[in-house]
Image (spheres, grey):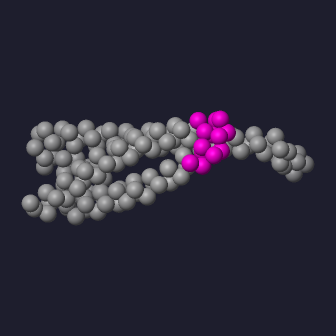
């Protein structure tokens, strides 16, 4: 097999792998939110550890995908991916495009969920600060 074919196969495997990992991340982010709402600190610590184990894997695959696209002579973006998909036979092309669309949708959903969790954490922090009396005194605010 040619090196180019191996690289394309690697790229497609990476998309499938990341698709599964982002589904896992989404589930963990949902669980993280519930733990924060319930104030289940021990469970939250465990969920956060699971999330932290996924991040380097996702980052590594993204880096590998970028390097592979560049080595294939295309841009390291959606346009480059679409170009690689155009090299595939019809059935594989359709499956690859669908997997890529699902992956990009999962990434967007995880990003949104993570932002919502961050907002929840911020609101909880503000509440706790006010509840415990750590708000700045009104004299120090204009």
Q: Main secondary structure of the magenta part?
A: helix
Report x, y in % for residue 119: 61, 41
Residue pictured at 63% horizontal, 46% vertical: 42
Say which residue appears at 37% left-offset and 59% top-offset. Answer: 60
Count of numbered circles on the image:
0
Q: Which stretch appears magenta? A: 34-46
Give the residue drawn at x 13%, y 47%.
88
Answer whether residue 18 is visible to the viewer in this image. yes
x and y percent of residue 23 in the render?
A: 40, 40
Give the position of the N terminus as an image quadrant: bottom left
Q: Is residue 79 left or right of residue 1?
A: right
Q: Quadrant of residue 90?
A: top left
The answer to which of 134 and 41 lies nearer the viewer is: 41
Image coordinates for residue 9, horizontal then vertical, percent? 19, 53
Horizontally, is 45 left or right of 24 in the view?
Answer: right
Q: Is residue 51 above or below residue 34?
A: below
Q: Residue furthest right?
A: 139
Residue 108, image quadrant: top left
Above or below, 104 against 57 in this view is above
Q: Residue at x 37, y 39 (%)?
A: 105
Which residue is more in the foreground, 73 or 54?
54
């Amino acid at each position: 097999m040619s090196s180019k074919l191996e690289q394309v196969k690697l790229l497609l495997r990476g998309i499938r792998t990341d698709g599964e990992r982002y589904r896992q991340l989404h589930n963990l982010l949902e669980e993280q939110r519930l733990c924060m709402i319930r104030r289940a600190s021990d469970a939250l610590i465990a969920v956060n550890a699971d999330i932290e184990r996924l991040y380097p894997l996702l980052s590594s695959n993204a880096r590998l995908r970028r390097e592979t696209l560049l080595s294939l002579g295309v841009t390291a973006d959606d346009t480059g991916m679409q170009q690689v998909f155009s090299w595939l036979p019809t059935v594989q092309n359709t499956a690859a495009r669908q997997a890529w669309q699902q992956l990009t949708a999962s990434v967007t959903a995880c990003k949104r969920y993570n932002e919502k969790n961050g907002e929840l954490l911020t609101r909880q922090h503000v509440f706790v600060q006010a509840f415990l009396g750590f708000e700045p005194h009104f004299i120090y605010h204009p």
